[in-house]
Each structure stands twice: as structure tokens, then as C-alpha cells.
Image (cartoon, rainbow, N blue to C red):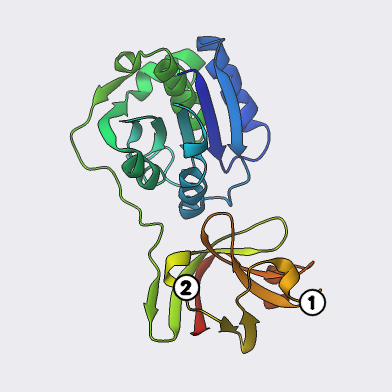
Amino acid sequence: MNIITLLTDFGDFYPGVMKGVILKICPDAKIIDISHSVEPQNVYQGAFLLYHSYRFFPNAVHVAVVDPGVGSERLALVVECKNHIFIGPDNGILYPSAVEDGIRRVWVIDEGKTSRISGELSTTFHGRDVFAPASAFAVLDKIEEIAKPYDGEIERLDLFDYRIEGETIECRIIFIDRFGNAVTNVKAEDLEDAKGFYINGTYVPMVRTYSDVSVGEPLALIGSFGTLELSVRNGSFADVFGVKSGRFEMRVIR
């Protein structure tokens, strides 16, 4: 296990420093960037992207850091599962992926020990001082040197916390992708008979591909995440409808 993936809301600069810390400890590590463009402090979005990416890697260590509680009393975890290891803050970001893979053992990182590697223990950059060193030790199969076993419950997060009552769907827009598509958390299995939706008074048809509507027209389809996405062909659904990530409500037509 020498693959380490990184998923953060850090943007540029900070991930590069994390890689330096990792390679200082484990020069043979293969570091893969999943994304550093998670919306700042959007733990749900980070958990969603981790959940839909980790399984495409063979036996990897996954570092996911979207951490509004950095520097607080929240725990820093290493979660050993059947096929993967997940490392990050105990705020729910690891939970959906770890549960799906099958949790075997949980560790709490000793921040005093990991910070000796970076030489720092910042209250704002645990990606560098806590989680990057922990991932390198996980690759080296030396987790016990920087962490202790944890028997408590880890923070839970339900990615699919939407409700469908009659014609009303209350869900989340998890994120807006670079094309302006609104990616929701509504699973395809609950929309098998949906013909379309009313959103802000506009009818949005349920289709199979973008080309099923004319350029500039809105549409709904099941995207690559297996969830409902709202789009405008060759345009931005987010701009046209003025939506952003967060709770969202619409009416389904069956």
C-alpha cells in the first residue's frame, strides 16, 4: 500500500507542502490529488467526493481534510478498513466511505508525535502537521508509532439525507461543478418513474443525455455519481436558476 490520495478544500500552495512532508518520511509514496477545490468548509461535499472516488484506487491511503474545527478538541483519525485506510478529522467526512469499505480498527492520531516530523503544530494547518505525517506512517505500516487505538464512535454523516413526500423532494445540492451543473444527493433508484421537475416555476424534463433537449434548455438526468443532476445544455444551471450548494426543494412530476 504505497498510494496516498489527497482531497481538501485547500486550493493551491498548502497541498504542495503536505506532499513535501509525506515524501520526507516516505520517499516511495505515490501521491494522487483527487481535488483541492472542495468548497471551503463544505464537509458534505468533501465526504461525497471521497465516497465516489476511493473505490477506483487499489488498496490506498486516503487523506480527506475539510476541517472547520481545525485546532479544536475534535479528534484526528486513522480508520483502517478492509481494503483502504482513511485519514482526516472526526467530523463525518470519512464516515460514508469507511463504513462502505468496512471498518476494522480506528486510531486517534497523537498530534504531538506527528508534529515532530514537520517541526510545527499549527492550530490552522493540521493537513501539514497531523494528517500528512500520519498518511506516510500508514504507508509504512507504522500507525501505532503515531496513534493509539480508539474504541469510541466516530462522527456520522448521512450523504443521502433527502426526503420525498408526495410530489415534494427535499434534498441537497452537494456541489456545482465547473460546467454549472447542480449535483444533488438524490439517488437514481428513487427517480425511476420521474418525468421531470418544477424548479422555481420552470419545468425541467428528465432525460437520458444532454442532447435530448435544445441548446440553452434546462434538463435533469442521472450523472456519473448515480445521483440526480440539474443542467442547462451548453450553459450553467447554477447561473440560470441562481442556485448554490445547500438544502434544496423541488416538485417531481411522475
- Residue 143 occupies quadrant: top left
**Picture mark count:** 2
Give 170 or 83, whichever is nearer the viewer. 83
Mark 2 vs mark 1, CA separation in Å: 23 Å
Q: Seen from this angle, which residue lies furthest bottom? A: 201
Residue 139: x and y in percent read 44, 17
Residue 128: x and y in percent read 52, 26
Quarter placement of the N terminus = top left
Q: Secondary structure at mark 2?
A: loop
Q: Seen from this angle, which residue lies furthest left? A: 151
> Which badge, 2 or 1, comes first in the chain's sequence?
2
Inspect the image, locate mark 1, and give the three-letter code of the amino acid beneath it: Ser
Q: Residue at x 75, y 78 (%)?
A: 217
Give 220 or 75, whichever is nearer the viewer. 220
Q: Secondary structure at mark 1?
A: loop
> Would residue 24 appear left or right of 76 to someone viewing this image?
right
Q: Residue at x 42, y 12 (%)?
A: 140
Inspect the image, locate mark 2, and give the three-letter code of the amino acid beneath it: Leu
- Residue 115 occupies quadrant: top left
Residue 153: x and y in percent read 22, 43
Q: Residue at x 30, y 47 (%)?
A: 155
Does residue 90 show up? no
Q: Which mark is residue 214?
A: 1
> Would residue 23 appear left or right of 78 to someone viewing this image?
right
Specify few, some or many for label 2: CA neighbours under 10 Å numbering under 14, 14-19, or 20 or more: some
Q: Which mark is residue 191?
A: 2
